[in-house]
Image: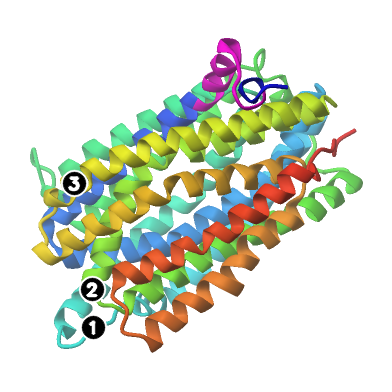
Amino acid sequence: MSIRKKWFGDKAFYGMVLAVAVPIMIQNGITNFVSLLDNIMVGRIGTEQMSGIAIVNQLLLVFNLAVFGAISGVGIFGAQFFGCKNNKGLQHTLRFKLYICAGIVLLGILVLIFKGDDLILLYLHGEGNDQALQMTLEYGREYLWVMLTGLLPFAVEETYASTLRECGETKLPMLAGVAAVLVNLVLNYLLIFGKFGFPELGVVGAAVATVVSRYVQAVIVIVWTHTHAEKMPFIVGAYRELKIPGQLAGNIVKRGTPLMINEILWAAGMAMMNQCYSMRGLDAVAALNISTTISNLFNIVFMAMGSAISIIVGQLLGAGKMQEARDTDVKLIVFAVLSCLGLGGLMILVSPLFPQLYNTSSDVKHLASVLLRMAAACMPMWAFMHTTYFTLRSGGKTIVTFLFDSVFLWCVSIPVAFMLSRYTGLAIAPLYLCCQLLDLIKCVIGFILVKKGIWLQNIVA
């Protein structure tokens, strides 16, 4: 087989891929774009407000990814059940997602209520700016208490939306996401700055806007699913019974638990990495917040390609088409890496421009621009790492992905970041770059595991 046929698909292939990936890219793109606008709006108020929200959002990321990991672990079965046309199996996976998410929501609320202040304080460091640190804590606390009311609708919406995607319906979650972010954007403008007679609430206004938008998104997805039974036949009678077959539940727990634990540990690990970076002071926290928010806008391509691999390759594995799954996976990985090579170049070009939109010091703006260029250079590496991870996951190799992802983070990346941040005088930019380049090791591991084909298996037969 020629390299062209092995690495690249035909027009029909890319049409099929884009039909799955583009709605996810649009949804994530709009979400991240509005997140960028939100970030800029809050950044126009001041550095302390922006830093307080950034710290809380880092903590909430642990909750969000716990939900994502829980439903993704179950979703491996959902995609393969859809591939073999098993609606009863899809009903069981939907119920299982709801049960596990209810537990995560309850635990998340309890932890953030009783330990929220202590967690925020982990990120507040710096000499001679006690007032700024105290203000950052206060703004973070105000934002957190409102955001707690949005945890439940987020979990339920993600449960339904993920099931729809596993069934090939990616447009509706995208449209719901578009509606939600538009609501979020409008309410942010009205409530942060007090426009058109609305109260000027600052960081509280940003939180209220986010919570309202989450309820809007959840209502749209849930109502559509229950009113389109002809497209989603699994929803008919989905709650006539609440039990899940013991054998299936055992299989989901066996394969899904490592994935959920992985996502929780990964999110906690990223929070720990950012805590290490925060040792360089509030300027580092603010600059990282700006660069991360902007780079997330560009990262939607490889994130969507990971989801596309889960759906497309998962369905092929469920249908028993192993060789087609392998060939498709290679083409998807190549497409993701080459796309991110181009996007990384574009990101380097615009890196000096975005930080100028923030009302912060020139030092923070310059540092954010430097960190953006570093993130841009890492994009092709992240794309390869991300797509190999989702390849392994599509075949149910969740223990392998657990070792590949979280164990590596906690055993390699975090110790290096901890040592460099506490025992060297390395500035934030070279410290950040050193930690990101450790992912090259994961790329080598991912390449070997994917090439061996250990993920080529049908787990619902």
Percent from the top left, x then y, of residue 441? Answer: 59, 60
Q: CA distance from mark 3 to mark 1?
A: 26 Å
Q: Quadrant of the N terminus?
A: top right
Q: Amino acid at mark 3?
A: Phe
Check whether the beta carbons of the residues at disc 1 and disc 2 lie within 8 A of each other.
yes
Name the residue tied to disc 2: 282
Q: CA distance from mark 1 to mark 2?
A: 7 Å
Q: Residue at x 18, y 46 (%)?
A: 354
Name the residue tied to disc 1: 126
Q: Residue 168: which quarter of the image?
A: top right
Name the residue tied to disc 3: 354
Percent from the top left, x then y, of residue 233? Answer: 72, 19
Whether residue 267 is situated above or below residue 386 in the rendered picture: below
Whether residue 353 is situated above or below residue 28 in the rendered picture: below
Please tell me how crowded label 3 is: few (under 14), some (14-19), or many (20+) other residues with Cα within 10 Å: some
Q: Residue furthest front?
A: 2
Prevalent SS, magenta region: helix
Q: Is residue 262 left or right of residue 218?
A: right
Whether residue 347 is situated above or below residue 83 in the rendered picture: below
Percent from the top left, x then y, of residue 132? Answer: 16, 77
Q: Residue 131: which quarter of the image?
A: bottom left
Q: Is residue 249 left or right of residue 94?
A: right
Q: CA distance from mark 2 to mark 3?
A: 19 Å
* Chain part drawn in magenta: 6-21
Q: Residue at x 31, y 50 (%)?
A: 293
Q: Amino acid at mark 2?
A: Leu
